Image (cartoon, helix red, strand yellow):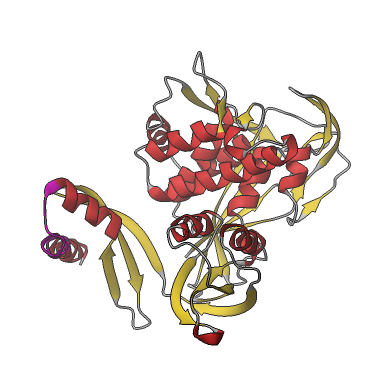
Amino acid sequence: MKVLIFDPIGGASGDMILSSLVHLGCPVDYLRGVFDALGIGNFEVRTKKKKISGLDALNLHFDLGCVKREHDHAEIRKMIEKAAIPEKVKEKSLKIFTALANAEAALHGEHCNHVRFHEAGALDSILDILGIAAALDWLDVERIYGRPLPMGKGLVKCRHGIIPVPSPATTLLTQGLKVRWPEVEGELTTPTAAAVFKAIVRNGEPPGNTVVVGSGYGCGDKTFENWPNLFRSILCETAEEHRDRVFVVECDVDDMIPEDWEGAIQKLFETGALDVTLTAQVMKRGRPCIGVRVIAREEHLQEIEKTILVHTTTIGIRCYPVERITLPRRNYQIATPYGKLWVKEVVTPEGKKRRKPEFKDLQGIAVRNNLSLPALRKEIDNILKELEKEKA
């Protein structure tokens, strides 16, 4: 299993994180293909090598020309959802944007959909975030851990005027995260980088049995006296860990309109739920009810609890930690006569592989081509068997 460690040596920004992932090995041409899928116009992706404290580092930036620079959260969401890019890239990038939008909305008293991104989310930051999600997918990273973010000090000028460092958005986004406070004047961690750490970086330490397989260094345009403005991404391999600690959040609901469950479940998954199940139950006095059970990681626990209390009619919830055992898994695409299709593959303890096409893709192909699902599933199974023979 591939594990990535984000190490903000001297700073963290969207372009520095993306630069480190490109320096680690993600091809710029792959990123260009993802960016082109947004359909936002012509712009250039440029890279240059720099020496920071004697170390080779990469600086990636965008020449945007006359492309529209500012977008609100709703526009960004629509652009990403419509783009022909992998679902995992969409999911990660939307998580990061949602974290950023929620912070800006809380600071300015607006609905998150109406937040208009300026410094923290202009087009270059949109591309940074999408690029980070795409690079992580290309590197096939399954888990991301982070070292403490450097916060800096002083004042910085923005569209709204003079604000303190760290910025209010960065301060809000880093709540619950590990940070450090070096005696350096200037903004060392931007809201974009803080949103990345908030949305996709796990709490806790990486597994102890990791082997380093590569590292990449990204740098920004800023320079500080006696301070290395560097961000490092360290790629590791670790033995598959099938057992991890998650939380169960549950409640019983007997007075909710059935149609409202669809929206509540969607909100829970958007908030980071690993799984959501509803079961028919009988409460005291023989009253029918719905039992809600949500599986979540610790970093998403508070948001999950809040979502249940806001989007269902329950007046109380139960929460407790459990250990979860999962099979090693990976997702990949295969070519079929009907287009590309995502496949989920797991490995059993005996080392046998089980493969299954993603039902959403399977159903889409069946509808578009007027095929029966059983016949299509059999055809895809035959394709998978042939691919396995070719590998052997």
Who is closer to the viewer here, 74 or 309?
309
Q: Quadrant of residue 101?
A: top right
Q: Which residues are magenta?
A: 369-380
Expressed as whole percent of the image width and height from the top left, the position of residue 123 reads 55, 27
* Residue for point 20% across, 65% down: 388
* Residue for point 55% across, 35% down: 73
Does 201 sit above or below residue 11?
Answer: below
* Residue for point 70% across, 47% down: 8
Tell me if residue 48 can be seen.
no
Expressed as whole percent of the image width and height from the top left, the position of residue 268 reads 53, 59
Please check the rendered image and state whether residue 378 is part of the magenta-colored stretch, yes or no.
yes
In the rendered structure, the answer to whether residue 5 lies left or right of residue 388 reads right
Does 340 sit above or below residue 31?
Answer: below
Who is closer to the viewer here, 208 or 119?
119
Residue closest to the far front: 285
Does 125 sit above or below residue 383?
Answer: above
Who is closer to the viewer here, 95 or 294?
294
Identify the main secondary structure in magenta.
helix
Q: Quadrant of residue 343?
A: bottom left
Expressed as whole percent of the image width and height from the top left, the position of residue 304 reads 60, 62
Which part of the image, by quadrant, shows the C terminus? Answer: bottom left
Expressed as whole percent of the image width and height from the top left, the position of residue 303 reads 64, 58
Q: Quadrant of residue 12?
A: top right
Give the total of numbered labels: 0
Tell me if residue 134 can be seen.
yes
Residue closest to the far top: 66
Who is closer to the viewer here, 353 or 307?
307
Please check the rendered image and state whether residue 95 is part of the magenta-colored stretch, yes or no.
no
In the rendered structure, the answer to whether residue 42 lies left or right of residue 177 reads left
